Image (cartoon, rainbow, N blue to C red):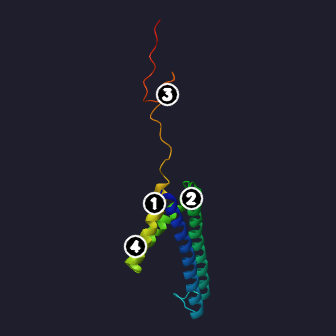
Amino acid sequence: MVRRPVAWIVAVILFVEAFGVAALNWFLGTVVDNQQMSLAGLDPDMMSVSSKVGGLVFGAYFALCGVVALLVALRDRSPAGLGRILLISVAVVHALLGAFAWGLVGWTAFLTMVVVLALVVLLLMTYDQRDTPVSEGPEDSAGGGSPLTPPPTPSTP
């Protein structure tokens, strides 16, 4: 089945993205702090701290989504409740990041975001299918058994 490998791949990708986003924002915050850069008169220390905190929060969000995907892979069950909401929200985030990446970074970053988006949607859709068969209709109360077997004939004396 394709469900578990996709869940494992999504979990690994989200953990790598969590580390990458946190490290990138931490690096940018350090650069702003070392260069004493300012944007429209904002305090450089505030910009540095907000970049670092934002990177940690966004990295924690990706890591939490990665934990949900990891639990899906380990349990081989559909995510429910908050986990499903987190996976849907990370799919939306990747769609938005892909749209911004097309204009700002280029088509390779866009393609990367679309691949991750497709994997998250595939994870959500493959676990959405029901594994148990749905009954065809109500069973006969006289003990007819399967809906494909004919009902018993009454016996006359």
SS label for mark 4: helix
Q: Nearer the viewer, mark 3 or mark 1?
A: 3
Which residue is the site of mark 4? Answer: 111
Which residue is the site of mark 1? Answer: 122
Q: Which residue is drawn at 55% across and 66% down?
A: 11
In which quarter of the view is residue 66 placed? bottom right
Q: Is 77 rendered above or below residue 100?
A: above
Q: Nearer the viewer, mark 2 or mark 3?
A: 3
Q: Which mark is residue 44?
A: none
Q: In terms of sequence position, does the residue under pointer 3 or pointer 4 come before the other?
A: 4
Name the side, left or right, on which 29 lies relative to 147: right
In which quarter of the view is residue 83 placed? bottom right
Amino acid type shown at disc 3: Gly
Q: Residue at x 60, y 81 (%)?
A: 52
Which residue is the site of mark 3? Answer: 145
SS label for mark 1: helix
Q: In terms of sequence position, does the residue under pointer 2 or pointer 1 come before the other?
A: 2
Task: Bin the neighbour count of mark 3 within 10 Å (Cα to Cα): few under 14, some 14-19, many 20 and up.
Answer: few
